[in-house]
Image (cartoon, rainbow, N blue to C red):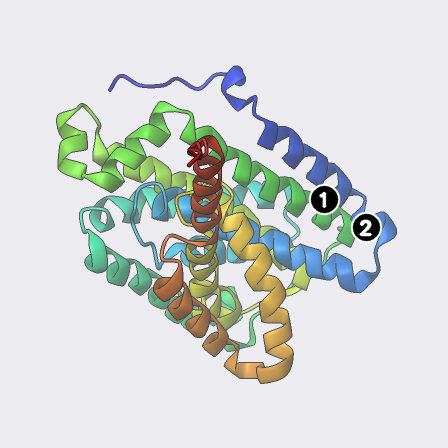
Amino acid sequence: MPGRRLSPRALVHPGVGAGAVVVAVLAVGPLLLSRYWVGFLLGVFVMVSLATSYDILGGFAGYLNLGHATFFGVGAYAFTILAGRDVAVPLALIAAVVAPVLLALVAGPPLLRLRGVYFAIAAFGLVVLFRVLAYNFSDLTGGAAGLTLITAIEQRTVYWALLALAAAAVLITFALTRSRAGLALEAIREDEEVAEAFGVRPGIAKLAAMALSAAIAGLTGALYAVDVFFIGPETVFGLTIALTPIVMALVGGSGVVGGPLLGAVLLFTLSEQARALIGEYSLLFYGVVLTLTGLFMPGGALRLLRARQRRARRRRAVPASPVRAP
């Protein structure tokens, strides 16, 4: 398919420079902030990485992947199991990427033959399946008791790694918008049959998008496990972790660069306050937010902001009508 090829020049954009400044400022966080705020930012980075990686397939290709948390959980378990058996941390991290990618390459072809609500339901079944497996293979996964992970990795190291991963995830989605691969995914989202008629190979494009999103989610899961010291079936395969990143992407603006980032920052901040007020009913908060988003800004917050900016520019560009003297 003829289209844009990604080059280093394609990444030259004012937003990239501004993002680099923000990352540089955040990088000094562990040196200046209290332990509470460092922990808070770690949670933000996890959700930014998850929501952004979800959006590679869910936003650009238009496939609502309710099973995205499966890759997060597989990465978390792969790392925790290996690190707990004294495997070197770099090798365990590689396994945390390879395992979910292999799962995507195996489960992806049959799943991606489905579309719409059928794909969403089948993908969610993958999360349920792995939660059941995590409960039942207790010799390996610890079952309901979960696994505890103690490493010599300092919190600041995890902080910088998650910050780098979140920034890389956003940069990857930005690069996709300026590449042939991104153009192919957007064409699939608009009309898969027409895209195929113009030379796009939907099966390969969707599978590559799922594998890329799985790699980011798996590495996020591994770093999350290091940060919290514990994982269990409900923490990495539960309903909350399955739906939260998707809601964040939809609220911020799915399929828009920076949309999942905005949604993750806003909703994670608000959810921390909601959790303090309503405790175990925090999922109710996400349900209300998603309903309001669908009613009042179905394209997400970032699309709404950009639409208002365009209207404001058009109003400024239209010259005022001359007033005729009576």
Viewed as shown, does residue 81 lie left or right of 29? left
Please tell me which residue is depicted at 55% across the width and 56% down the height of the picture.
264
Please tell me which residue is depicted at 12% across the width and 27% down the height of the picture.
197
Q: Is residue 98 visible?
A: no
Please tell me which residue is depicted at 25% across the width and 63% down the height of the picture.
121
Distance of mark 1 from mark 2, alpha carbons?
9 Å
Please tell me which residue is depicted at 45% across the width and 38% down the height of the picture.
315
> Picture quarter containing residue 277?
bottom right
Pinpoint residue 78: horizontal percent, then vertical percent: 52, 53
Label 2 residue SS: helix
As drawn, the label of residue 32 is none
Pinpoint residue 234: horizontal percent, then vertical percent: 49, 72
Q: Are marks 1 and 2 in contact (CB under 8 Å)?
A: yes
* Of 258 and 197, the residue lying toward us: 258
Q: Which residue is mark 2?
A: 30
Say above or below: 79 vs 16.
Answer: below
Q: Which residue is mark 1?
A: 160
- Residue flagged by tag 1: what amino acid is it? Trp
Say above or below: 314 vs 263.
Answer: above
Say above or below: 73 vs 253.
Answer: below
Pinpoint residue 233: horizontal percent, then vertical percent: 48, 70
